[in-house]
Amino acid sequence: TFNLSFRYANNAIKTSKYNIFTFLPLNLFEQFKRLANAYFLFLLILELIPQISSLSWITTGFALIVVLSITGVKDAIDDINRHKCDRQVNNRKVDVLMDGQLKNEKWMNVQVGDIVKLGNNEFEASERNSVQKETNLKVKQALTVTGELGDNIEALAAFNGEVRCEPPNNRLDKFKGTLTVNGERYALDNDKVLLRGCTLRNTEWCFGLVIFGGPDSKLIQNSGKSMFKRTSIDHLTNILVLCIFGFLASMCSILTIGNAIWERNEGSVFTMFLPREPGIDAPLASFLIFWSYVIVLNALIPSSLYVSVEFIRLGNSFFIDWDRKMYYPKNDTPAQARTTTLNEELGQIKYIFSDKTGTLTQNIMTFNKCSINGKAYGEQVDFSWNNLADPKYNFHDHSLVEMVRSGNPETQEFFRLLSLCHTVMPEEKKEGELSYQAQSPDEGALVTAARNFGFVFRSRTPETITVVEMGRQVIYELLAILDFNNMRKRMSVIVRSPEGKLTLYCKGADTVIFERLHPSCNKLMEVTTDHLNEYAGDGLRTLVLAYKDLNENYMIDWKQRHHEASVAMEGREEKLDELYEEIEKDMMLLGATAVEDKLQDGVPQTIEQLAKADIKIWVLTGDKQETAENIGYSCNMLREEMKDVFVVSANTAEGVKEDPHPQGARPPLWEPLHYGVLTDDLTPIPSSLHHQAFALEKNLRLELLRTACMCQTVICCRVTPLQKAQVVQLVKKYKQAVTLAIGDGANDVSMIKAAHIGVGISGQEGMQAVLSSDYSFAQFRYLQRLLLVHGRWSYIRMCKFLGYFFYKNFTFTLVQFWYAFFCGFSAQTVYDEWFITFYNMVYTALPVLGMCLFDQDVNDRWSLQHPELYAPGQKNQYFNKKAFVSYLIHGCYCSLIIFFIPWASMNDAVRNDGKDIVSHPSFAFLLQTCLLAVVHTQLCVDTYYWTAVNHFFVLLSTIGYFAISVTMYSNGMFYVFTSSFPLIGAARNTLNQPIVWLTIFLTFLLCILPVVAIRFIFIQLRPTINDKVRYKMRTEELPGPAPRHLLRRRSTRSGYAFSHSQGYGDLVTSRKFLMKRSTKRAPLFTQTDSSIFQNQPQHYRTIAEEAEESQSHKL
Amino acid sequence: MFRVSVLQTTDVIPSKEKSRCGRVGGVSRSEKMVKQESESANRPDNTAFTQQRLPAWQPILSAGIVIPGFVLIGLAFIGIGVALLVTSRSIQVLELDYTGDGNGSPCSSCSQSTTVNCKCSLNFTLDTLFQGPVFFYYGLSNYFQNYRRYGASKDDNQLYGDLSYFTSPSSSCSPYDYDGSKNPIVPCGSIANSMFNDTFTLTRTVSGKTDSVPLDGKGIAWWTDYNVKYRNPSVTPLKNAFNGTVKPIDWAKPAYELDTSDASNNGFVNQDFLVWMRRAALPNFRKLYRRIDASGDYQNGLPAGNYTIDITYNYPVRVFNGAKKVVFSNVSWMGGKNEFLGIAYLVIGSLCVVMSVVMLIVYAKFKFPDEE
């Protein structure tokens, strides 16, 4: 009841926007906020004014109703789904402690301040202070004081405390608060709260106190604020629509002036047949004509454009979702287009920013090498690459095993550290069956290594860690965990051994640890540094381990200060950082570990393909420079022939500025720069919040960009998540190029959000990247399919659609413009009103949709075979202002033909029974038929890929037109709706005349033949890459998949072992080498694009498979 | 095009796939299949549609199609053009302007006076037989029947014979919906009000004797107009239906007196009225006035001789710089005389042939793609 007085948000959530009563008004309001819809409403109002109305309101009303109802239905379905979701969520059951006993309650009835019980694998209903145990990947621990309560219901019911905490916010990684129990204050941080949306693991149950409910919870606070990305084509279209508005206004002005002149010269003397309307003099009449023409020419503003664009994008998104070649069977993950509005942008990517770990690499870590006390181990490791599929690597250096078993103290301390200093959670369901849940795969690998070497991390409680050391169980008292974060780049634990010895164990990045070592370690540090360089050179991820013995008194004091700092409400983190800094110094170096992160399948090929498509790939990684550089070599980004490797590396702003200057001094050499490794190697200053790479500082940004853009390959190392986003924004802002960021981890989220298109790899590191991404799939290599196939197709389709759409509306509208000169500028429509109504919505809707959903200039395999097909998209060649003007001119030409050929042939024409034919309805019908014949044939010329659906749509529309026309002009319709269908008989009295058919035939051939001729001549004179490939596709069989995997790691050392001097880059890129191999025998590995291949780890081809394999090349 | 037919190893294809593609060898792996069924629940369907490999026809603009295509189209056009031109040349047309602009012209006096039913006559001579059937048209130029407000100024319901619209005509007829004393006008609107009211009679002078040429005014309007679109109210006598209404302001007699001799040609279904109400699409137009009745001397058309058209001149066109004419014409299968279509077909056909030669030269010279 106390809590009720504050009116905390209750736990019912509402993500839906409407209910039954508010749906119509709210949804309509939302829709009319769109400019296009508002414009149509405006038109509708104009049409209701009789003096202006040149068209019946039905025309616009119909279009508007169709558009509104399509969008409305979509919104309604979305909202119904949200309602269902809400209801499902709100009605979940949870046990709530009430009046001393547990009661089963619905989620929505949970109140702030309630104590709830959760079972294993149950969802979190609301955010709460965890009272018991811990959860899944993130370790959550209850305060000792509440943990002691256990599952004692009575004790819990009697529990009385007060929580003070920060107001609701959306930061998932931060929480500040205190719990006051019996006058004692306890700190509550992120480790103590469970967030809504989590799942409980590793524990049977937990009790918790509800802190935030429903809308206040962090999950809800985070959702809904999605960034709205728009494509460059969207922007262009908006600009073009504005241009069209201008164009429309000028046309209407011309016609208004025409009308004024006509009224003066002709209209004034024609009044005996057509008196002016009372109260309207000539100038006012002309002014009204302006608006009448706005109505008549409204088709210039494409009404159904936005709806159709959305529809096409949706279709193309579905094709991405459905693509089996982007489905990863190992973890059953299909590709997912999470945003359905960005498809065509995928065909225009110029820069790719890629994370390394988990994106280029598998993020499956194996403990590979180590250096203990200046001695390197792991050299003779026998890694048979057949074992790739086996996730449990064994470390095969016997000497190390012997060292451990012989009781070497440093070696034992080394592994003890590995078994103690981490945040891994053990899970031991059965005796001996131990499994670890680690926050990062690195940690898991290290702890597993220690376990194999006889230091088995067995279990942990908030205050103890149980380790089985060489068969002997030892329980360490855990005094503090100084956890890892991006700034600290290290973590430590402070433990007390059973003997009472206090030790701080620390592991972290080399630079960070080396700064904090005791001076006596200098010599060892040098040796270790050598080893580290060697490891990094092999592309391994390194960590340095150190320890420090602590003094009991100092520890008590520190512990006290630590407690104070951790309950501080303000500046808690800064205070803690200071404390950590204080204790983590003068440490003794133990050694270093090297963990291997294997490259994903097909990464080198993908990068090579993307490079061929002229996409620049920048790798942004937090790794060391050497590691990054070697990754670059092993994944084909850097090749042997790239000589001018240069490294920008400096510690100060001045230094960064100085560094690239050698090139500046010899300007001619800018050109041959092939690649640069950019590293912003900084010493992070923990206290500085504005920790920023100097190179990203304002005055150096352009310099950086200029240098980087001249390179073929750019690798940025040691960048923080924030810097990743900054780099992306830099390129986005100054290069005006379309960027794509791809990553898998939480540290890539900012970059993914910053780029035009964010791609998430749904892999090992959780879902954060995927959740903030626009597209997601499981393997980096699918990127080439996403871009080179789907992106390219989407782009081509969208461009074709826009081009055709503008063309068809220009043609349609300009015919009216020409007619104005023959009807006294009176805003008389040349077409039947029903035709205007149906033109966009019915007659021409389906064929263009068919084309834009199915068209492909060349199929997927040829697209991949010729990555250079991608280039036109990057240069935005298919739809730009120039193309738009050409569509305008084309439309103009066609409208001239469509109007003036029938005009000339119908002048003074009569039917073959002598009766009149040039009546308005029949002339209108003739022009309509010509127009549809022309635009449909134009579509046929534009369509490259004629599926049955396309045939059907074109036929259906053509037949439909005649069927609808004949029906509308039939007697029956006139009998029923006399005044709505006054054009009775136009169809049958026109279509039975040969002269009409001859005119139609002439008109449409005059419109189409020049297009065909010009295209043909252009193909001969200046074939585009598409023409070439299409021609080639006709004449040649698709060559078998190129033998690509010759780069297979034969080295027994490491996947990254292609060092600078002894790589195979030259061999790979020289065609001779590849061809010679392939003629001798089938390649060892075919491309892994086939879905079947994906299921398998690469393994050597057996003889039995050879026959089948050779088949595959004939495809 | 693209098929997955590399079926390498045994245990990777889930049963879902098997049932669909049916090409998987029968290796026993039922256990694994069951397992993988659930594991690959998200695997997209393998259909030609979802995988975007629907069978398709992919035409390209190759020389083998385009160049012969142009030649064929060109030749066909030339053929059609010749046929059209020949047909069109065989059609006889006689146009006589009677606006009365010049002082010497026959109707100049009528055109300047405002006399009702002013008479004037036009003479013309035929040297040879004017092949029948011959159609007699009147033509107006610079007359904007296609003006929007003009075109809208009628009431379809009224013209359909709906009596309720007799008393309250549609407002679209304004200002010809009510007369000065608020009586409804029937038929209302500008189109009806401005009905063409010149009349013609044609006489032939054969050896000093004048012989009136029989003119047939039946069936000159569209069948649909006469039978469907326009209808007299079912009131007999027709006059009663018009009680309480007034005739259009510029009309000499009310609608029910348009043709008192023939009930089926009276009122709204009067053929002349129907022809006028079918408004022209362009400002210069002609409308069918009469057919030359193919009987007696006129069995085969108008025989050679001297003819006189007696005109009752009422319709003012000079105020708006218009012109009036009478036209005699016969028709062919393609309708009236139409030089344009024939010439256009000939020109376009020739251009196609020329174009095909140009393309052939371009193709022979540059011949894509010879170099990569």
Image: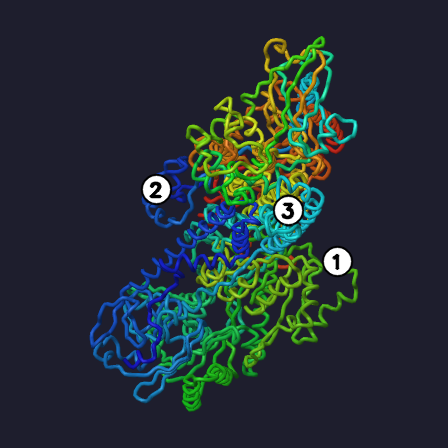
Instruction: Quickly name the residue at label 3.
Output: A878
Secondary element at tag 3: loop
Q: Amino acid at mark 2?
A: Arg
Q: CA distance from mark 3 to mark 1?
A: 30 Å
Q: Residues within 10 Å of mark 1 (few under 14, many from 20)?
A: few
Q: Is residue A866 visible?
A: no
Q: Amino acid at mark 3?
A: Tyr
Image spot of residue A213 (x, y percent): 35, 72
Q: Nearer the viewer, mark 2 or mark 1?
A: 1
Q: Which mark is residue B29?
A: 2
Q: Which mark is residue A796?
A: none
Instruction: Quickly name the residue at label 1.
Output: A671
In-image side of B188 versus A551 (left or right): right
Chain letter of mark 1 equals A
Image quarter of the N terminus of chain A: bottom left
Secondary element at tag 1: loop
Q: Nearer the viewer, mark 3 or mark 1?
A: 3
Image spot of residue A1038 (x, y percent): 58, 37
Q: CA distance from mark 2 to mark 1?
A: 59 Å
Chain letter of mark 3 equals A
Image spot of residue A1035 (x, y percent): 62, 32
